[in-house]
Each structure stands twice: as C-alpha cells, then as structure tokens.
Image (tube, rainbow, N blue to C red):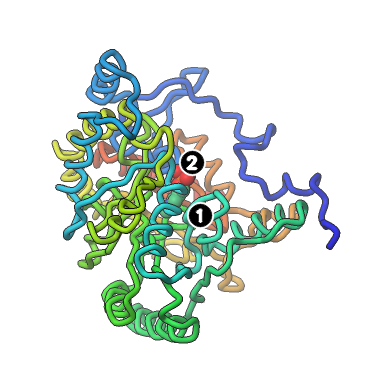
C-alpha cells in the first residue's frame, strides 16, 4: 500500500518542545522549587519540569555524590562489578513493597517498560499486555504501543501513516473508559470490564497488566477506590503479572515511596525512572521478583543497555533516596491536604473547574464548559481554529511566576512540585491559580 499523509502537517500535533515557536521561556538556573529565567525572573516550578525534579533544583548533596563518582570512575560496564550500582540496587529493594528483590537497570522509562514486557512475556509465555485508557507508558515503538492515551496513539498512528509502517506492535489491548454514578460503582464496572477483556482475549495469551497507580501525564487520574484490589485478584486468578508503572508516581511523589502503596496492593513488577535520580541523570529500571528474571538470566542475555545503571546516575539515585528519606516524603504527607482542600475550594467556587483529583504532590485539575458540561475543545486535537481557554490559565499562571504541567487533552492542568515545596509555596500557587481562573473565564 502507498504511504499516505503529509509530513508537513505533522507539526500541529508534535509536542511543544519540538516547536521552534514554542515556549519563549529560557530557564537558566534553579534552587529548590524555584527556577530562574534568562532575565532573572523567578518561577515556582509546579511541574517539576517533566514530573522528575523530585528533590528540587540545585541540590548540593546530589551534585556532590555525582561529582565524587565522576572523579572516582565515570563508567563501568554491566559485565563488571560496580559498587555504587549494587548499593543502589540494594537500596531500591529495601524501599520497594513486597518481595521485589531483583533490579534491572535501563536508561529511560520507555525502555524500563519494554524490559518489563519482555520479562513478563518470557515468564508467562503470553504476549499481550493490557493497559488503562488514558495511560502513558512511553514514546518508543514498544512503550508507545502500550500507551492507552488516545492523543498519543493518534500521534503514533499519524507518523505510521506517513512512513507506511505498521502502527503498533501487535497485540496490545486497552480496556475502555466508563461512566458511573459513584467511584465505587466505577471501580466495579471497570474491573468487571477488565475481566471481560481478559476472558475475551484468552487469559493464556496475556502476559501482564501494566498500570500507572495515578495516570500522570494524561491528567492525574487515580483509580477509583477498590479498583487495584480487583485488578490484583484478576491477575492472581488468571496468572497474569501486575506491572506498576511508577515512572511518575515513584519516589515520594504520592506520599509513599511508590504510588501503588497508596492502593494497598503488591505488584509483581515496578518500573521506575524520573524521580529515581531526581532528574540529575537519566536512569531507569525494573524491580521484579526473582522468578520473573531467572528465565532471562538462564538464557545468559541480560537485556541491558550500554548506559543502563550508569555509575554517575546510581550515585545520584543513592543521594536522592537519602534526601527523600531525610524529610521530603514527610513534607509531602504533611502538606498534601493543602492541595486537596485548596483545589476542592476552587472546584466549588468556579463552575468551569470540573474535577480536581490526586495524591500527595501529584494533582490534576480538569476544566469544562459549564454551558455544555463537556471539556473545552483542545486545539491540538480539535483543530487550530478552536480556542482553548485553559491555555489562558496556564499563561496567566506563568505571568504570576508559576509553571504547571498540561494534561492530555490540554483541558487539564497538572500540579506536581518538587517534594521540598513548602506549605507557603503551595498557598502562593493556589492563590495564583484562583486569580488566573478569574482572569481566564
Ligand atoms: N511511563 C510514564 C508513566 C511516564 O510518565 C513516562 C514519561 N512521561 C514514561 C513511562 C516514559 O519515560 P521516558 O520519557 O523516560 O521514556
């Protein structure tokens, strides 16, 4: 079949950082939750950039640990022993829930998720991985295929159309969204539907169910109460591995070491990235039970990448974990209710605020058009000629010295500050949000 599509049309859907006319903001330095632009203007970084600067900017303890490692030995291959790598591995096993006693390192979250898929396939003999609608699991060919976010999938498909390539890696399936009268009913309906999908797909063909404990970049969606417990039961019933994608939710972001702990459920694997080094170096990996890695180890193929478990990244990881342990996770626990109460107040005050939900220091705020009860149009999805007033909230916040994330669709904003962020800084941002909403609508 002839390739279709016009490459020149793609920039309308390309993420903003590829856009030469994108954000005019140039960031030059940072300190804690604050970043400074090239004019010396300061901003509270309530996105932690891409939800990864968990320990805050300019943390000297992490910088010193990395420098020391660099001066000692900058790189050791995965076939040789590296003390700092082993130490980080042990530390991760200590903080992980349940009996996840093996760690395999990669470089990015996408690769960690693909590694988890390979381990799950090898262990179960199944090939399919079920993921949640609106999930994001990465941008590479395999991790993109796992992603259940409709906009990301449309983007991958539009690329595929121009190159004439296969759209996604087959076969990956995605359970659908639901409407229900209560969160409890939603949990039941969604879990019942998941079981229907499992049976329909043939349970033996399914290797794993991969889920973010709180769907992060799409808009901060925790699962309804009881849902993850049902998912765990289904995984046990049908011999399917439960893989928690903790790329955003890990390392204190939700008030626990890992987000899945807020659901009281033990996964079979955890994938991690971003917060493990608090952004100071690229590092990612998979925490797994011994039986899930033994098959690959026996084959003598370690599935690793050259820079997986890079010693300088491991040094950053060890220092970052110390920083989280020495007060930052406690700080999140103490202050999370400021988000909960403050955002609930905005929700009751403004009829354009449809929903505010989250955990710890990860909150999504969704906006809707009160006239229709529907989300505002997202120009990136619905066409360039449509106004999205939520972008005025984002720019209004930037004018007031606050940076936030944008969900997918962009009718939502994400608040996800560094874990060192103080109660006072949260109050400042909630006031700025209040003012930005008043101005925008
Ligand atoms: N999983 C989740 C939940 C993510 O949020 C991301 C990145 N935003 C990824 C995986 C992919 O990680 P990376 O960009 O490091 O490949």
Count of numbered marks: 2
Rendered image: mark on residue 216: none
User: In which quadrant is the N terminus drawn?
Assistant: bottom right
Residue at figure coordinates x 76%, y 56% from the top left = 164
How packed mark 2 is, by other alpha carbons closer than 10 Å (few <14, some 14-19, many 20 or more), is: many
Tell me: 75 left or right of 385: left
Which marked residue is nearer to the observer: mark 2 or mark 1?
Answer: 1
Quadrant for the C terminus, please: bottom right
Q: Residue at x 56, y 73 (%)?
A: 373
Question: Is residue 344 something that shows in the picture?
Answer: no
Q: Position of residue 110 (x, y in %)?
A: 47, 48
Residue at 29% x, 78% y: name it. 230
What residue occupies the far front of the structure in this picture? 299
Considering depth in this image, is 70 or 220 the residue closer to the camera? 70
User: Circle 1 is placed at which residue position?
Assistant: 143
Q: Seen from this angle, which residue lies furthest top?
A: 71
Does label 1 point to a residue whose CB lies under 8 Å from ligand 1? yes
Q: Is residue 12 above or below residue 188?
A: above
Residue 252 lies, in percent from the top left, at: 25, 47
Q: Which residue is mark 2?
A: 397
Front residue of 57/393: it is 57
Left or right: 156 as drawn, with respect to 329: right
Task: Assign a secondary structure to mark 2.
Answer: helix
């Amino acid at each position: 079949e002839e390739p279709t599509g016009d490459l020149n049309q793609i920039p309308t859907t390309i993420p903003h950082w590829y856009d030469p006319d994108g954000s005019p903001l140039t960031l030059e330095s940072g300190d804690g939750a604050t970043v400074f632009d090239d004019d010396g203007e300061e901003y509270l970084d309530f996105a932690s950039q891409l939800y990864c600067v968990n320990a805050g900017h300019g943390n000297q303890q992490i910088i010193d640990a990395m420098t020391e490692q660099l001066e000692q030995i900058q790189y050791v291959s995965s076939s040789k022993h590296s003390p700092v790598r082993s130490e980080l591995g042990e530390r991760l096993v200590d903080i992980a829930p349940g009996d996840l006693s093996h760690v395999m390192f990669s470089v990015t979250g996408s690769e960690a998720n693909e590694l988890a898929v390979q381990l799950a396939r090898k262990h179960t003999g199944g090939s399919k991985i079920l993921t949640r609608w609106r999930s994001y699991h990465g941008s590479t060919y395999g991790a993109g295929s796992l992603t259940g976010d409709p906009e990301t999938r449309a983007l991958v498909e539009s690329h595929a159309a121009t190159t004439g390539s296969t759209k996604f890696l087959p076969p990956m399936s995605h359970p659908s969204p639901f409407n229900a009268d209560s969160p409890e009913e939603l949990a039941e309906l969604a879990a019942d539907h998941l079981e229907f999908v499992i049976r329909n797909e043939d349970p033996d063909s399914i290797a794993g169910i991969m889920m973010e404990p709180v769907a992060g970049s799409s808009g901060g969606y925790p699962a309804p109460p009881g849902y993850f417990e049902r998912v765990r039961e289904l995984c046990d019933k049908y011999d399917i591995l439960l893989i928690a994608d903790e790329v955003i939710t890990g390392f204190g972001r939700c008030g626990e070491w890992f987000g899945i702990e807020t659901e009281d459920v033990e996964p079979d694997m955890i994938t991690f990235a971003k917060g493990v080094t608090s952004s100071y170096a690229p590092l990612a990996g998979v925490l797994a039970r011994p039986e899930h890695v033994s098959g690959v180890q026996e084959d003598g193929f370690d599935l690793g990448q050259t820079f997986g478990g890079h010693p300088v990244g491991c040094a950053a990881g060890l220092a970052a974990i110390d920083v989280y342990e020495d007060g930052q996770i406690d700080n999140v626990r103490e202050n999370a209710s400021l988000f909960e109460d403050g955002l609930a107040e905005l929700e009751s005050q403004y009829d354009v605020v449809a929903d505010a939900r989250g955990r710890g220091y990860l909150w999504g705020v969704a906006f809707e058009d009160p006239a229709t009860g529907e989300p505002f149009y997202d120009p990136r999805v619905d066409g360039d000629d449509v106004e999205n007033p939520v972008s005025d909230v984002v720019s209004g916040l930037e004018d007031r010295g606050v940076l936030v994330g944008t969900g997918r669709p962009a009718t939502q904003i994400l608040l996800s500050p560094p874990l060192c962020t103080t109660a006072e800084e949260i109050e400042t941002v909630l006031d700025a949000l209040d003012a930005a909403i008043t101005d925008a609508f």
